[in-house]
Image (cartoon, rainbow, N blue to C red):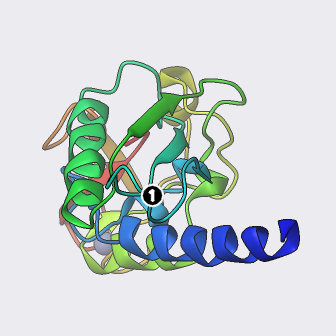
Amino acid sequence: MVEQKKDIDKTEEQKLWKILEEVKDPEVPVLSIIDLGIVRDIVVTSPLSSSAGEGPGVRLIITPTYSGCPAMDVIQMDIRLKLLEHGYRNIQIQQSLSPAWTTDWMTEEGKRKLKEFGIAPPNPKQQFCTPEMFQQEAVQCPRCNSFHTELISQFGSTACKALYRCIDCKEAFDYFKCH
Ligand SMILES: [Zn+2]
């Protein structure tokens, strides 16, 4: 009986990962929160159907791309709405700040989508997101792949992106610093 229940939870968990792919980053709508790598854990907390008529419960652990990112409130609300839409009730979302999010958690698929969107993906050598770190980075132009770029402004179209210009193709572009 115990084994059987585990299998059900596993299936339910996989379904949840799929559903969460529908939740997009409000600032870069081509990216899902799964692409960003901010969903750390999903726990199914109550049975799929109960005599009380409640929907399945779920607890999520998410790690913000950096603490205090204003987009996180929107993301949490979007997660909640998406899960409610799929019949989940009793939704708990916990933020875990340690270990801190790193750009390594972003999926390869996510980095590819960012580049297609015209935003330079985070540098592979970048580890933790701190304002000091991105200042010295060599940022690659998403259009012509040149590293010959310069920082124009630490703030691009949103506070979480920096504005760069490519010296070779003369295009300005956003660099995704920490979400
Ligand atoms: Zn360029």
Looking at the rendering, which quadrant does residue 72 occupy? top left
Q: Residue at x 26, y 61 (%)?
A: 24
Mark 1 C-beta closer than 8 Å to ligand 1 = no
State which image quarter holds ligand 1. bottom left
Residue sitting nearer the eye, 91 or 63: 91
Q: Going by the image, does 13 lie left or right of 143? A: right
Is residue 14 visible in this depiction of the protein?
yes
Q: Number of labelled discs?
A: 1
Q: Residue furthest front?
A: 51
Residue 126, x across and y down, in percent: 65, 45
Q: Position of residue 73 (x, y in %)?
A: 25, 30
Label 1 element class: loop
* Residue 21 relative to residue 41: left or right: left
The residue singled out by tag 1 in the image is 50
Where does the image place residue 17, in percent across and percent down from the top left?
50, 69
**Mark 1 is on which residue type?**
Ser
Is residue 37 depicted above or below 159 in this figure? below
Q: Quadrant of the N terminus?
A: bottom right
Furthest-left residue in this view = 157
Q: Is residue 148 visible?
A: no
Question: If the image is split into quadrants, where does the C terminus sit?
Answer: top left
Left of 153 or right of it: where is 128? right
Crowdedness near tag 1: few (<14), some (14–19) or many (≥20) residues, C-alpha within 10 Å: few
Q: Quadrant of residue 76?
A: top left
Rendering coords of residue 8 (x, y %): 66, 75
Please say if 126 is above or below 130: below
Tell me which residue sits at (30%, 81%) in the image: 116
**Near-viewer residue (134 or 70):** 70
Up-down: is 90 above or below 176?
A: above
- Residue at horizontal 47%, vertical 57%? 36
Taking the spot 63% from the left edge, 55% from the top edge, the residue there is 105
